[in-house]
Image (tube, rainbow, N blue to C red):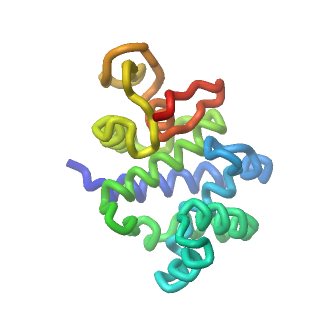
Amino acid sequence: MTDPQSWVSTTYERLADLLAAATVATWNASSLCEKWLVRHVIAHVTMPVRLTPEQFGAEMAAAGGDFTVLSDTVATRDAALPLADLLDQLRSPELHAWQPPGGGAAGALSHAVIHSLDVTIALDRPAVAPREAVTAVLDHLAATNGTLFGVDMTDVRLEATDIAWSTGHGQLVRADSGALVALLSGRALPGGSTLPRS
């Protein structure tokens, strides 16, 4: 079995390759993250490269202990960094080895895959995460029954169109595996499709 952390590295490297060849307009395009442009998503995922634990603690204190506030503050501020710097940080071995506190390798993989899909789906580009990585995150999100992102899985059946994968019973939702990850992460797809909120 492939080490999930190696999938993290591959995902970030491929995302960097995609954006290195992109125009500034692409960086300024909307992502699937509500109110965030592509550059905000990249500023968010590369935050561990820029903030020491002490700096993170100070940011958290300034945000009143609210991680959502911290994320929005840092993403808004650091999205203004030079694109070359953000690309370098996206390729950083430090980022590729980073794991969220208490989340381990599975948390790092979910973070990389979900946020990469926030970019690629919004830009109508193929997923940069390896298919096995997307499937692993899909399995993880389904196993939590939508609770991680407040999605209501009651009376919903999800079926992937690109792999042999399905879960649940009820109203049928068919999409490719990356789109299903986005839906289970509480995102709205470009066409407006969402899953019910719990």
Q: Which quadrant of the structure image shows residue 149?
A: top left
Residue at image location 61% in from the left, 63% down from the top = 69
Say which of 150 and 173 sits in front: 150
Q: Residue 106: x, y in percent?
A: 31, 54
Q: Residue 75: x, y in percent?
A: 65, 63
**Residue most toward the right?**
25
Q: Residue 182: x, y in percent?
A: 50, 37
Would residue 159 be seen by someone viewing this image from the given angle?
A: no
**Residue most toward the top?**
171
Residue at image location 65% in from the left, 30% down from the top = 190
Location of residue 99 with respect to 188 vertically, above or below: below
Say which of 161 and 154 sits in front: 154
Residue at image location 32% in from the left, 65% down from the top = 102
Say which of 59 and 50 sits in front: 59
Q: Which quadrant of the structure image shows residue 173?
A: top left
State left or right for residue 77 relative to residue 93: right
Q: How many marks?
A: 0
Q: Residue 82: x, y in percent?
A: 73, 69
State left or right for residue 175 relative to residue 86: left
Say which of 69 and 107 sits in front: 69
Location of residue 40 with respect to 86 vertically, above or below: above
Would residue 65 be seen by someone viewing this image from the given angle?
A: yes
